Amino acid sequence: MRKKIVAGNWKMNKDLPSSISLISDIKNEIAGKNYNTKIIICPPATSLETAGVLLKGTNISLGAQNMYFEESGAYTGEISAKMLKSVGCQYVILGHSERRTIFNETDEIINLKIKAALKNNLKPIFCIGETLEERENEKTFQVIERQITYGLKGFTELEIETLVIAYEPVWAIGTGRNATPSQAQEVHKFIRNLLQIKYSSNLSDNLIIQYGGSVKPENARELMAQNDIDGALVGGACLQSDSFIKIVEAAE
Ligand code: PEP
């Protein structure tokens, strides 16, 4: 049985005081509850250190939204995997469509980032997904296959086992327009089949594949009830503790 993971990607929202307040609200919401679902929050870099302290001893894991692939040196403005580890991060989102489109990250750059994350024992939440144009041109499966092939190039099955994959159709991110449960399930199943062909049934059966793209309390249950959907990567709806925790409860 695969565990469900619900991760909140705060993006460039919440300064330090509002991060502290959201973390405290989330902790209050889940106090005394024992969820099977793994909960991860990914605040902006400026809040990670404090979040790491506030989350100690809780069942909420900490993730970052990005990192650079080099270990250290003259890379102004960048943050390394080791730095993220040092403030308590266990996960890092890599390959998010906003990084791919706004910051020109290629499959090759994402591959280097995954490599650096794994080397430092950070678990990548590896995002893949097609644009609306690609979907309309029936290129969805081709794009997913390319992103997986190049993003995961050179890794052993043991290394890939530590990853989480997030299928996030770009047309559904921040648009309020989610993929229907059957559209999402179709791609998740395709990803699982691809993993079986490229690696093994064991990997394909056990790898966690989240769905992301306008997940809200109202649509979360049906999406996560699909056979191959193991949780959600949540943007907008994770910025309030009540809607975020409703999604966690839908995963349960
Ligand atoms: C995301 O940024 O990963 C995301 C899924 O955003 P939203 O839930 O707002 O569509």
Image: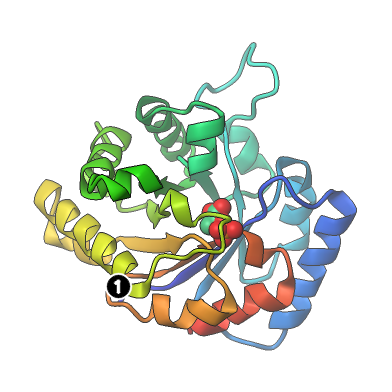
Q: Which residue is at the front of the view, 131 or 216?
A: 131
Q: In this view, does 212 lie to the left or right of 58?
A: left
Element under disc 1 = helix
Residue 12 x %, y %:
71, 45
> What quarter of the picture does the N terminus occupy?
bottom left
Q: Specify whether tag 1 is near ligand 1 (CB below 8 Å).
A: no
Query: Would you identify the image quadrant in which residue 35 lies?
Result: bottom right
Query: Would you identify the image quadrant in which residue 51 lies?
Result: bottom right
- The residue lying at 64 percent from left, 72 percent from top is 244
Query: Would you identify the image quadrant in which residue 57 lies?
Result: bottom right
Query: Colour scheme used in the picture?
Result: rainbow
Q: In this view, does 91 lie to the left or right of 237?
A: left
- Categorize mark 1 by other alpha carbons within 10 Å: few (<14), some (14-19), many (20+): few
Residue 145 vs 224, above or below: the answer is above
Residue 78 x %, y %:
65, 25
Residue 31 vs 168, above or below: the answer is below
- Judged from this view, the residue extending furthest toward the top is 74
Residue 139 x %, y %:
24, 44
Label 1 belongs to which residue? 182
- The residue lying at 24 percent from left, 37 percent from top is 146
- The residue lying at 74 percent from left, 69 percent from top is 240
Q: Is residue 77 visible?
A: yes
Q: What amino acid is at disc 1?
A: Ser
Ligand number 1: quarter of image: bottom right
- The residue lying at 55 percent from left, 81 percent from top is 218
